[in-house]
Image (cartoon, rainbow, N blue to C red):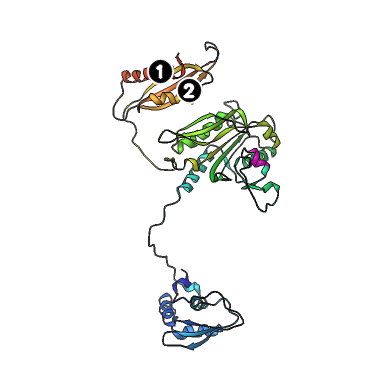
Amino acid sequence: MCIACALISRPVNLPGPHDPAIAVTKSMAHTRAHRVITGVFPRYGIGSAEDMRRILTGLGFQIAGQDASSWAVTVPTWRVDVFRDIDLVEEIARHYGYDRLPTTFPPVLKAPAPPDTRLEQNRALRRLATAAGFNECVTFSFIGERSADESGERGEGVAIANPLSETFAVLRPSLLPGIVDSLSHNRRHGQRDVRLFELGTRFSRTGGERRTLALGWLGAGNPEHWTERTRTVDFFDLKGVVEVLAAAMGLEMTTRPATRPFLAPGRTAEIVVSTPNGAQRLFGTIGQLRPALAESRDIPSQDEVFVAELDLDAVSDLVTMLDIATTRALPRYPDIVRDLSILVADVLPAADVRGTIRSVAPATLVRLAEFDRYVGKGVPDGRVSLSYRLTFQAPDRTLTDAEVDAVMNTIVARLVAAHGAVRR
């Protein structure tokens, strides 16, 4: 409890502290102070006018009677901190002892504001990234201008007026330079398998401040275990982590080929999400760091580094599921599973095939997953065999084989028309 707030009488408007060489006289409504202090210290015998006079006089204040309800108090020249009547009331309470104030809770006059949804999202994303095997790192918001240019944001860095050094010359337009430097630091100290993420803010001249999640992966793509051979991380390992994060946020994510100056050609993609009106919105970038850039950061040339950067502010209005507790009844009716294998051009993205299937499938298609990709004997040159598993289920009835077969025929016909697919 703030005694200065509890014992306020009528405030006196003053421009500031008084000149220490001049004694100043203030008016103090001791009757109101008496009522308040008596209410605060009812059991300790404090609060009478004589008690207050005794305390103030002992502290060097001179008191003269002004009327029945107030005093004229002269402030000593050495007390430059006392220039309002509330300061005099505070002196009385302070001298008697704040420790004698009873423990009370302030009254709750209205319900507290709900927490910022972005904070809840940040906590959930940290838990998800940690569950995926990543460790959180916190890097400087200041980076060198060269690092800012190498991150593909040439000219976007906001210069610092008084930088500590050239290494901290601009506000970071991307979180990736800090992630890559942290990966390099761990690699130089003997850590061959490193997964790092950072959730922070990046700054640019055109975009302003953006809440961003960056991930970096170096080394093994799977844990060491005697049951399987350890392999090196690849593009699809990190893409899988991003898909988990997107699914947790309730986002429908796809990737499309892209180029970035700091990422390797042919191993770079843009991450886009679908909006309710069917439009595509850029969510981030994923790919392999250019080997030359990795070597310049003292990462061995044989080590492949994969990074991703997600713009969380770009999808903040689309997040629907993250950290929200929801329940639904278990299915009462059985599902029907169909496998579909097709031959398509080997340059056709698998995401396009999935999109085509979903565009003509009814709501009873509850799951769609790829389970095989084959190139070799029996597959013509320039073609690839893709296999999909489709799961159908209705919430209110048992589907029949005839219904599912009709849907499968529709899907195959659409794949043939859209992509020249051949069913195997």
Residue 417: image location, x then y, percent: 42, 17
- Label 1 packing within 10 angstroms: few (<14), some (14-19), many (20+): many
Q: Amino acid at mark 2?
A: Phe
Residue 169: image location, x then y, percent: 67, 48
Magenta-tinted stretch: 146-151
Q: Which is nearer the eye, 289 or 47?
A: 289
Could you say whether the residue bearing mark 1 is in a helix, strand or loop? helix
Q: Amino acid at mark 1?
A: Val
Residue 100: image location, x then y, percent: 47, 74
- Label 2 packing within 10 angstroms: few (<14), some (14-19), many (20+): few
Quadrant of the image occupied by residue 307 = top right
Quadrant of the image occupied by residue 194 = top right
**Which is nearer the N-term, disc 2 or disc 1?**
2
Image quadrant where one finds the C terminus: top left
Residue 254: in magenta span: no
Q: Residue at x 57, y 38 (%)?
A: 215
Residue at the limit of the structure toward the top, as seen here: 378
Q: Give me the C-alpha separation between circle 2 and circle 1.
A: 18 Å
Q: Is residue 176 above or below residue 350?
A: below
Identify the residue under disc 2.
371
User: Main SS of the magenta segment?
Assistant: helix
Q: Which is nearer the eye, 335 or 70?
A: 70
Could you say whether the residue bearing mark 2 is in a helix, strand or loop? strand
Q: Is residue 60 above or below residue 232?
A: below
Residue 149: in magenta span: yes
Residue 22: image location, x then y, percent: 59, 83
Identify the residue under disc 1.
412
Between marks 2 and 1 in the image, the one whose residue lies nearer the viewer: 1
The circle drawn on residue 223 is none
